[in-house]
């Protein structure tokens, strides 16, 4: 069973980049899964950020596409999220997740809260 | 962009009762791409149903999904205390995932 664990700064300054990493165990980022990031502002619903496949294919939420990059590190078996030019509106719990197929998100990390504030 | 609208926003029921949650899409979607998730406070979402009606691994059979086109339903046949949570529907497809705004299922 795949296990996912997010890590990264809990506080980011406005206008700066937000960078998070998701460590994968029980599976490999080189397999056929899609590797996904989802966020949830405090007290609000879920928003899909984007996804990446080991083939190099990626897809992003159109509303965030200009600011988002998702990358895979096969040597460390992890994947990462970078969100540029953040504002307070980007404050959220960020989840890494994965889809094994059939367009369902099977496994989720526990989530990490990132607050954008000076 | 396809919008998913869930209703009701909040559903107040008692343990043992039947819960019916609705998810309507702004355009017809393939049932293959409709999923339901449960989220409890402080926890990550958990996959319940995929392909509109397929239970995920380990999900009790009191949870069932149905629907097609633009109207989808999650039914919990007899509520257990641990079922009180927020439920999200989600539509996916090549390169896109969209969530509904959620239905909060609370104890009456």
Image: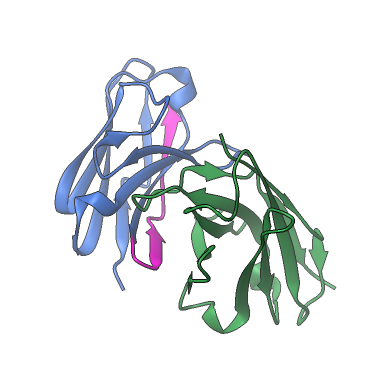
Chain colours: A green, B blue
Left or right: A98 with respect to B27? right
> From what the image shows, is residue B59 above or below residue B85?
above
Q: Residue at point 49% right, 62% down?
A: A48
Left or right: B11 with respect to B107? left
Pick whichever, A89 or B36, lies toward us: B36
> From what the image shows, is residue A70 above or below residue A109?
below
Q: Which residue is farthest top?
A: B16
> From what the image shows, is residue A60 above or below residue B47?
below
Pick whichever, B6 or B8, lies toward us: B6
Residue B98 location in percent, x, y? 39, 61
Q: Residue at point 85% right, 73% down?
A: A118
Task: Say which quarter of the image contains residue A2.
Answer: top right
Image quadrant occupied by the N terminus of chain A: top right
Left or right: A42 with respect to B87? right
Task: Say which quarter of the image contains residue B65.
Answer: top left
Magenta stretch holds residue A1? no
Pick whichever, A31 or A35, lies toward us: A31
């Amino acid at each position: 069973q795949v296990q996912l664990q997010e890590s990264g700064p809990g506080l980011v300054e406005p206008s700066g980049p937000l960078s998070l990493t998701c460590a994968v165990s029980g599976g490999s980022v080189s397999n056929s899964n899609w590797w996904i990031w989802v966020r949830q502002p405090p007290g609000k619903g879920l928003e899909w950020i984007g996804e990446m496949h080991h083939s190099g294919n990626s897809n992003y939420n159109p509303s965030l596409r200009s600011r988002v990059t998702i990358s895979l590190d096969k040597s460390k078996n992890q994947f990462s999220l970078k969100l540029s030019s953040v504002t307070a509106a980007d404050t959220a719990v960020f989840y890494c997740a994965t889809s094994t197929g059939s367009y369902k998100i099977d496994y989720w990390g526990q989530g990490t809260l990132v607050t954008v504030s000076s | 962009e396809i919008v998913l609208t869930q209703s009701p926003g909040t559903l107040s029921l008692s343990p043992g009762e039947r819960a019916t949650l609705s998810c309507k899409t702004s355009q017809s979607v393939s049932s293959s791409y409709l999923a339901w998730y449960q989220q409890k406070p402080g926890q990550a979402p958990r996959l319940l149903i995929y392909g509109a009606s397929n239970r995920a691994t380990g999900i009790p059979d009191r949870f069932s999904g149905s629907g097609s086109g633009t109207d989808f339903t999650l039914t919990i046949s007899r509520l257990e205390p641990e079922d009180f949570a927020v439920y999200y529907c989600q539509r996916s497809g090549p390169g896109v995932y969209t969530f509904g705004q959620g239905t909060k299922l609370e104890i009456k």
